[in-house]
Amino acid sequence: TGAATSNTSDASFVIIGSLNVTAPNGGESWAAGSRQNIQWTSSGVSGDVRIELSRDGGATWTTLVSRTRNDGRQGWTVTGPSTANDLVRITSLSTPIVSDTSNAPFTIR
């Protein structure tokens, strides 16, 4: 009848923050030459972030912005070539294990 249970961790651990790409997050179609906002949310992450682009579904990555404030938005003038398997990745510079990638590919046209 309602017996309480508990457990204690066998080792100490640290709770780290999170990043979440919100745009482009999959399905968007952005025209080369247009000005778009790469957007993300952040929780418990301090310091700057790096923004990268993959044009091949995550097989390779190119740095778009090596360091920017973790303020949730970075303007980008979209560059070609036209591709349909693009992803964005945001990574914390102070805690590189904290990173997020677009949930699904977007298109650059």
Image (cartoon, rainbow, N blue to C red):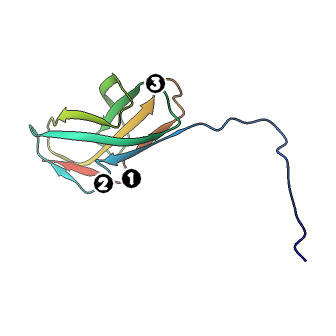
Amino acid type indicated by mark 3: Gly
Q: CA distance from mark 1 to mark 3?
A: 24 Å
User: Quick one: label 3, few (<14), some, or many (20+) residues within 10 Å?
Assistant: few
Across and down, in percent, residue 16 comes to 60, 36
- Badge 3 marks a residue whose secondary structure is loop
**Where residue 43 sits: x, y (%)?**
49, 40
- Earlier-in-chain disc, 3 versus 2: 2
Q: Nearer the viewer, mark 3 or mark 2?
A: 3
Which residue is denoted by mark 1 in the rendering?
A: 103
The quadrant where residue 70 appears? top left
Circle nearer the viewer, 1 or 3: 3
Residue 66 position in % (x across, y down): 34, 22
> Residue 6, relative to residue 50: is it above or below?
below
Q: Residues within 10 Å of mark 2 (few under 14, many from 20)?
A: some
Mark before the other along the chain sequence, 2 or 1:
2
Residue located beneath label 2 in the image:
26
| Quadrant position of the N terminus in the picture | bottom right
Residue at x-position 34% and y-position 48%:
22
Disc 1 to disc 3: CB gap under 8 Å = no
Residue at mark 3 to residue at mark 2: CA–CA distance: 26 Å
The answer for how far apart the CA atoms under marks 2 and 1 are is: 6 Å
Q: Is residue 3 above or below residue 16?
A: below
Residue at the location (87% across, 61% down)? 5
